[in-house]
Image: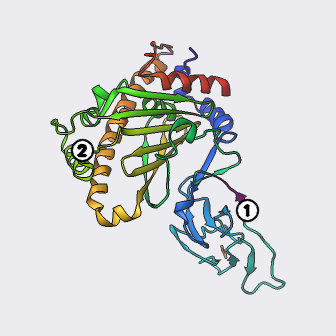
Amino acid sequence: MNHPSIKSYFDSSICQAEIDSMFSKGLSYAGHQLMVPDKYAYQVLPYQHDRYVLFNQGEHFELISNVCLHRQAKLLEGSGRARNIVCKVHCWGYDHLGTLKGAPQFKPQPQGQLDKTPLNAWNGLLFKGRTPNFDLAEHGLDTYINFDEYFYAGCESAQYNFNWKTFVEIYLENYHVSSMHPGLRHYVTPDELEWAFGDDFSVQKVGLGKNLQKPTTPYYREFQDALVKRFGDALPKYGAIWCFIYPNIMIEWYPDVLVISTIFPKGPRQCVNHVEFYYPSALYQASPDYFASEKQAYMETAAEDEQACLLLEQGREALYLSAEEAHGPIEGFLEAGVSHFYAFLAKQS
Ligand code: FES
Ligand SMILES: [Fe+2]
């Protein structure tokens, strides 16, 4: 087994090499079509400090630079619809394709074009460059990872004080669920787990808990009561489906909820996770509380995962500072995703 070295969790040059090999050259998620549902809709993307804007151009989607060509002001904020982009500082004007159309007082008028990146679609997700080699239907996921009738409900960004690989390791195993997640461990059946693997991805399908009435945490109580009210005796087979696409993209299914998250390193000791929520429009209009209860449970689990990651980080930091190397065995079933991730890392270096 190729474990990443302890040093790789703390060393800036190794972190930069990971960014160059995996993030700059690997699969690169840019956003979802639902973020910009109509022609001229735009969404400033949080990755790279709002550097790019996702634009719906009618027939296609593209990223446009969000930095003015004159004195490099930031152009757009948030989301909306725009046929023209006008810089607030000196009113340089661009059309929706990013072509410079006007620069007050300049004679002759300067020519210019904001940088653009074309995007390729895969099941509604938009990628720079190639799309994942991952056939959802082949893995029985096409009815689950299906954004029809869904809308983009917003993004939450979480900053973490640990290495990005630690987040991925915790994401890719079910071994910690019974010990670290007092709520999630009753909502799902962690040992009723189905794995699938491909070069680009792994999938965990986790069975729904057998008894949703059992005592649990207050947020999971609220969420599970809402689920029982919604589904009655026809409860879904799975409680959660977690897909991880290398190097950093997670697509998650929960009953009536889809989530896309992307984790980015910010140096070796920090990372940021951008978590996008997608809900079915009609059901959300009818029962917003149902989705609020799901989100509270989701956030409770995310906070517990952060604790798990910090514990791993602290132990490894102690080893790093005393220049020690240590690795334990990987449980073949519950931690299968971790071995697959380590093999992916080893292939990149
Ligand atoms: S910085 Fe944008 S017009 Fe001057
Ligand atoms: Fe977890």
Q: At numbered mark 1, what does the secondary structure look like: helix, strand or loop?
A: loop
Question: In 3D space, how far apart are the residues under numbered discs 1 and 2 (Cα atoms)?
Answer: 53 Å
- Residue 5 on image: x %, y %: 55, 20
Q: Dot 2, crowdedness within 10 Å: few (<14), some or many (≥20)?
A: few
Residue 48 makes an appearance in the image? no
The x and y percentages for residue 323 are 51, 15
Magenta-tinted stretch: 116-121
Q: Is residue 97 above or below residue 248?
A: below
Q: Is residue 49 magenta?
A: no
- Name above or below for residue 52 compared with residue 204: below
Residue at image location 34% in from the left, 28% down from the top: 190
> Ligand 1: which quarter?
bottom right
Q: Residue at x 63, y 40 (%)?
A: 23
Q: Residue at x 27, y 56 (%)?
A: 290
Q: Percent position (x, y) of residue 247?
A: 59, 37
Amino acid identity at mark 2: Asp
Q: Quadrant of the N terminus?
A: top right
* Most frequent secondary structure within the magenta stretch: strand
Give the residue at mark 1: 115
On screen, residue 170 versus residue 285, left or right, reads right
In the foreground, 10 or 126? 126
Q: Position of residue 3 (x, y in %)?
A: 55, 18
Name the outermost residue toward the front. Answer: 234
Q: Which residue is mark 2?
A: 233
At horizontal 57% and vertical 37% (from top left) the residue drawn is 138
Q: Amino acid at mark 1?
A: Asp
Say if residue 181 shows up in the picture: yes
Specify the farthest residue to the left.
215
